[in-house]
Image (cartoon, rainbow, N blue to C red):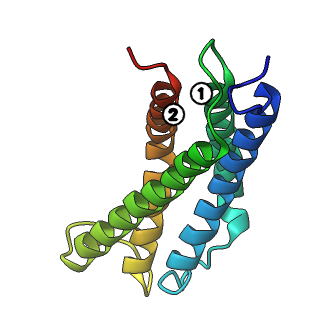
Amino acid sequence: MRGRRGCDRWAIAVVAAALGMAAAWLAALTLVLLLAPINVDQPISVADLGDWAWRWGWLLAVLLAAAASLGPAPVAAPALVARQAGWALVVLVALASVAGLLAVVAVRLHLWGRDWGLPSRSGYGARLAAVGAAEVLGLPLAWLLALRLWRRRQPRP
C-alpha cells in the first residue's frame, strides 16, 4: 500500500501523529509563556497544562493520522499534514488568547470575579478563560482540521 509519492501509509500516519503531539505541547508551552507574566497569584507551568496537552495531543494525533492515511485516496503529503498541525497550534492559541483578553476586560469592568480575594484578579481570570477555551475548543478544532485534511486528499471529480 504505497501512496502516489512513494510515501508509505504507515510512515505518513506516524509523521502525522508526531506532528499532532508536537502541536499540542507547543500550544501548552505557548499558553504558559503568554499567561506566566500576568498570572502572579498562582504561577503556571507546562506541567499544569500537561494533562490537557496529552489528551488533546493524542486526539489530534489520531485524527490527523487517520485523515492523512486511511481510505483509498492517495496519502497526504507531509507538508500538508504539517500545515494542518500548524493551523491547529495557531488557531487554538489565538482563540485561547482572545478568551484570556476578554476575561481581563470582564474582570476590569467588574463583570466577573468581584468576589475573588486575589491581588491579581485579571491574571487569574485570564488563566481560567484561556485554559477553559483550550479545553472546550480543542475537540472541535481537531475534528475540523482533520476533516479539512481528509477532504484535501480526496480525488477531485
Of the residues shown, which amino acid type is indicated by label 2?
Leu
- Where residue 157 sits: x, y (%)? 38, 14
Q: Which residue is nearer to you in this view: 115 or 93?
A: 93
Relative height, residue 89 to residue 12 (above, below): below
* Residue that label 2 marks: 149
Q: Which residue is nearer to you in this view: 56 or 39?
A: 56
Task: State the separation of the CA atoms marked 1 and 2.
Answer: 6 Å
Q: Secondary structure at mark 1?
A: helix
Residue drawn at point x = 56 percent, y = 44 percent:
80
Number of residue marks? 2
Res 26 label: none
Q: Is residue 129 visible?
A: no
Image quadrant where residue 9 sits: top right
Q: Which residue is nearer to you in this view: 36 or 142?
A: 142
Of the residues shown, which amino acid type is indicated by label 1?
Ala
- Where residue 154 sits: x, y (%)? 49, 21
* Residue that label 1 marks: 67
Of labels 1 and 2, earlier in sequence is: 1
Q: Which residue is nearer to you in this view: 127 or 5?
A: 5
